Image: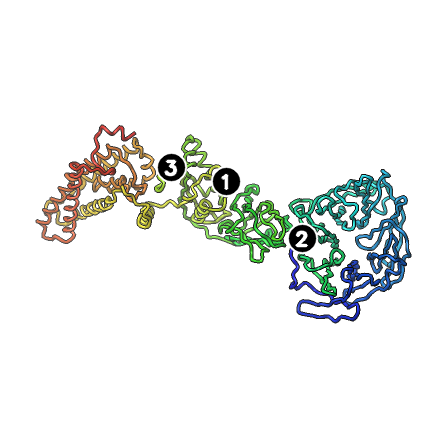
Amino acid sequence: MSAIFRRNISLIIFITFFSILISCPSIQTKDLVICNIVTNNLPDAAAIGTFADGKILFNIGNEDSLHLIKPDGTSDFINNTCKLMDSKGSCNYHLLNPNYVIITSKHTCKVIDLMGNIILKNFKYDKMSVSEKNDRFLIMKHKNNEFTEYNVNNIGRISKRISSLYFSNKRHKITEIFSLDNAWGIISTTKGDNSFFSIIEAQAKNKTLIVEELYDYDSTDTDTTKCITNNQINDIQYYCLYISSNDNTLKLLNISNLSLNNNSFNINTTDLTPDIGFDTDTYIHVIPNVGFLVEATAYLKTKYYIFNIFEINYFDQNNAFGELIVNNTYNNFLGSHIFTLPNKTIVRMIENHNSIKFVQNDLTSKIPKNNPYNNPHIKQVYPPNNESIAIGTDKLNITFLNPIDPTIATYISIYYINNTNNDESILRQKFLCTSPYCIISKDFYSLTIYLSNNTFNIPNASYYVEIDDKFIEYKYELIKIPGIKPRNWIIKTDGSYTKKVTTNSILGKLRLNSTGSDKFRNLSDAKKSVFFDNMTNELVRSIPIDYWRIKNVKYEDEIDMVSGATLTTFSFQIDPPKTHDINKNSSKEVLEDLNSLIRSQGFTSNLDINNYTGDIDKDYGFQKENDLLEEIELSLKNFIMDPRYKNKKGTNIIVFKVALIIIDLISDIRFILKNDLPELNLFIPSIIFLSFPFILNIFLAVIIFKFEMQISKNSEWFKHFIKPVAIVTVLSSGDIEILHIFDSNFGGFKIFSAKFSPKTLNLIFWGGALNIILENLPQLIIQIIYAISSSTYDIASLLTLIISILVFLVSVVECSYHLFMNNKNGNHVGIQSDCNDEKDIT
């Protein structure tokens, strides 16, 4: 909310002045106009003030002359002003618009014009104050608290109004009077040194003062107290700024609801810059239509702070901080060296060796402003409030008025505003404001916030940014900056962004981690169904998309191939959008969005804070369910590329046997289609010894799978892989031994990890032996006869014969192996005795 004035700022203009002794020519450069006033009285130089037309008035030491600088750069002076008082003491000066000066010395005052002519003669007073606009002044005498208000009218004439003030308690003594535009603030004390505040307007009929105690007010040091009036429609607010007598902090006083009937009012005070303890000197200046400029020493440095009373509610403690303007380095002038101009600029008198340099600074960009983010420390943001950004925007930016440093990490959150559900807030992303999500610029003035590229994912939608308090602190101040409250920084997405509506649905699935899986398995079936429905609803809300686009399909347990744990998976169908849907992302994009939200590392999404999605396995993500061919392709790829998928106990040779069985079946079918088989009387035998084993093998496969699904502990496995089971059932027509692909543990894949019961193993074994007798041996004999008898024997017939011989030999050897060899391999598939059936099944 602040900025440092630097020497190279183009807005800095050095005003041309004259020398006390000689005229001073201007020295002009590209950015500066410089002229010094040479004098031997630098420590006594003092600014008096600025007239309404922009003229500034100052004096130097005891030269008895006032120096006047006009807006056009010309200069003039009023000579022998203090001597006009006929006083041997020092004089003080005050502006009086339009063209007068009040001279005071030893409780005597006189008014002169800019030519040195006396307008009002000497008169005595006990207290005096000049109005905010310098167009009137008030003097008071302690006798009956009599006060006289002098007004300068629009033609420059001075009139006066006399009255008396009374306290209901006579112990009060007026110690100070402050200008409050059309009113006057009064500080009074009692014998107990307690300070009290009163307020009155000159036209008030009731002259009895109502008092309110003023805590922490130093009645012995009133020179630093300044007041300003904020005239709102039907609501006049008065503000005064003073230094606390206890801890040298700034106190802001607010006066409201002044009644002309009885002079009653409301009073409220607050601490400004509570974290800054000002060291020694503190000076307060009024900036017209803004508030206060405070010059103070803090942390052994002299600095300037601006308080924009007209726009910012400093009674909100989050905003109770003045903004750093410039370090007052190498300048001995303090307090009486500031001119505040009506156009929100200041002129500073700066010591320059044995001369005085006048520097004009534009405060327009330095004044803290009220903004939609309710955070005056922020200069600007990207994107600005309520402005549109493109879909996929992945960074935001905040520029501050002071250099910043990171603090202990606090959270930044992005919410989607669901206009279709009572403006419900849905969390899109929440993360700690640390690297790599928050990066401070090299000049320390801005903060870039990096997001995932799917945070803003819906066209013509509204989001808001929420930032916790104290997420950043000022680099050169021990002050932490408040954040941005909900819905104060609204971001909208571009409504012109359109998508072509796609027509494909996608099946995807996610799974719970170990904790979530255990909880889910302990639920009743009815509660599992409710859980599944609620999980579906949360997925819809988290994207968000129309509720009908995600359908729950099934849930089941699966074994994690890496950890070996049994985890619960949930399958969903994602349908394509319709033309009237707000979110027209395709099914694939919705799946990718969910996968990104689930797999997110370092930030939190709506899924993480919900009861039904909080235990989703982040490593698993949201995966597309592949069909059988895609699953086999992916599995083979993983098997080749990643050694962790290999299983030392797996019967990996099974793939060659399966391939041999399928090739043999195809060859046998092609053989019976030969044209000369009927002539050799081999067609009918070939049909019989092919079809009968074919039917017998399929029958055995159906019996085996039915048996396993009813009583086997692998029933859930069979339900999950129903499609591949059906395909293998058809292929088993060539040889029932092909079923061993499912219990081969090939590659360690779940689909090949079934554990058949002893009955099933026996059926497969004896079915295989029967297949040798009923198919392999007869087919081999028929093919040998054909080779001897056929006059049209070709290479294809020869390959069929070779395959039949190879299949017959492999089957016979394998059968003999199971019958007569004692294999100690734990995964060995052989004959099991029926006496172990019950034990194995349970």
Q: CA distance from mark 2 to mark 1?
A: 48 Å
Q: Residues within 10 Å of mark 3 (few under 14, many from 20)?
A: some
Q: Residue tagged by mark 1? A: 609
In which image quadrant can residue 701 be found? Answer: top left
Marks 3 and 2, the one that precedes in the sequence = 2
Q: Which residue occupies 16% across, 40% down? A: 772
Q: Residue tagged by mark 3? A: 556
Where residue 615 sits: x, y (%)?
45, 39
Residue 814 visible in this rendered orientation of the protein: yes
Say which amino acid is labelled 3: Glu
Q: What element does badge 1 sit on?
A: helix
Where residue 223 sits: x, y (%)?
78, 51
Q: Residue tagged by mark 2? A: 300
Q: CA distance from mark 1 to mark 3?
A: 24 Å
Where residue 53 sits: x, y (%)?
79, 61
Q: Nearer the viewer, residue 22 or 89?
A: 89
* Residue mark closest to the camera, 1 vs 3: 1
Marks 2 and 1, the one that precedes in the sequence = 2
